[in-house]
Amino acid sequence: MLDQFFRIFQGIYTLFTGELVISAARIFLIFLALLLIYLGYKKVLEPMMMIPMGLGMLGVNAGVLMLGASQHGTLFLSPLVSNVDQLMYFLQIDFLQPIYNFTFSNGLIACLVFMGIGSITDIDYFMAKPFMSMVIAIFAELGTIATFPIAAAVGLSLNQAAAIALVGGADGPMVLYGSIMLARDLFVPITIIAYLYLSLTYAGYPYLIKLLIPLKLRKIKMNPAEIHRVPSSQKFAFSIITVTVLSLLFPVAAPLYVSFFLGLAIKEINIKRYVEFLSGPLLYGATFFLAFTLGALLGASTILDPVVLKLLLLGMLALLLSGIGGIIGGLVFYKISRGKFNPIIGIAGVSCIPTTAKVAQHAAQDVNKSNMILPFAMGPNVAGVITTSIITGIYVSAFGTL
């Protein structure tokens, strides 16, 4: 009788009838989800990602029910369904299954986010200072390049190592797309790790800046007169030429290139209705469902896979090395400019648009309230998207599973 009573409250019932390890992991993830929601609410972490992701995690780990006599499951989604009959069943049962299968598993969600990002990206300073921007961005790929051999050395296959190394580029849609092409079996944990860590760049990179850049260098003011407005016609031509060249070189990543530069080209030609759609409903809608679905993918079975601990450590290493590399690039240009360049800008070479550029701006204003380096930081930020996309193309071409 008591058993029948508790069966009514199946989320609690399955905590006591499932494996101890799974139940403990569910409880841990419920509290982690509450923490992420709180940190998003306080704006310590990015609320647009953390609140929907946290709620997805909360729901999928609390809402476990009995499916049949002894099997546990949820009504959210099943990411590894391959049988057609099973897939049709889950498409009619799990409410996020259509979003996952028709936008996640084929990389569409990454492309939609990239279209929106392209439509709000300013490339004036990148085009005004292309050499500086590209060199810093190359330095900031340290984690993307160095993590690959390290990951292979600790037991990951070459395609898995390439997939986790892409976290160092700090470009969420790129990681999502790359992991689908490179390591579909690890797509879920790699993408979740990437987005969790990218939100943590708000909290972690400022300390890295303080650790590696002396106070007097952080106070350096940049000259606004160096920022030259570039005609829209030139920026439009740059978008078309760049997407053509990149697509010719790395066709496997062409959907990402086309998506980003389509948004950028529409912005520069100023098709207002399209710009409003791409930068508003499309970008925020795609970001919302991206975060919510990622949260719903983070069930107990995901974090209990032994390879996840390796991925957690390697993802952290990749972002740390990329941040260090970007700062080294900033210090190099400080020397080249004979003390007229603020090396904080180097962190923006890690291509999380516009997060790392904002991190650079906040770090500069912490020591000099009148300092405005955000326009300068957008140069390496945009260049970082290009360098990360090139490395993604190389990795997918060399190790992809297509």
Image (spheres, grey):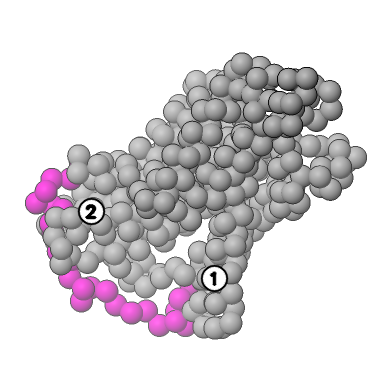
**Which portion, as a residue range, is magenta?**
212-240
Q: Amino acid at mark 1?
A: Gly
Quarter of the picture holding the N terminus: top right
At x 58%, y 69%, the residue is 281
Toward which corner of the image does residue 257 lie, by quadrant? Answer: bottom right
Quarter of the picture holding the C terminus: top right
Q: Residue farthest to the left?
A: 216
Q: Measured along the vertical axis of the image, is residue 226 above or below residue 195?
A: below
Q: CA distance from mark 1 to mark 2?
A: 28 Å
Q: Measured along the vertical axis of the image, is residue 191 above or below residue 312?
A: below
Q: Was residue 218 drawn as part of the magenta stretch in this picture?
A: yes
Q: Nearer the viewer, residue 29 or 185?
A: 29
Give residue 355's mark: none
Q: Secondary structure at mark 2?
A: helix
Q: Position of residue 67 (x, y in %)?
A: 80, 30
Q: Amino acid at mark 2?
A: Ala
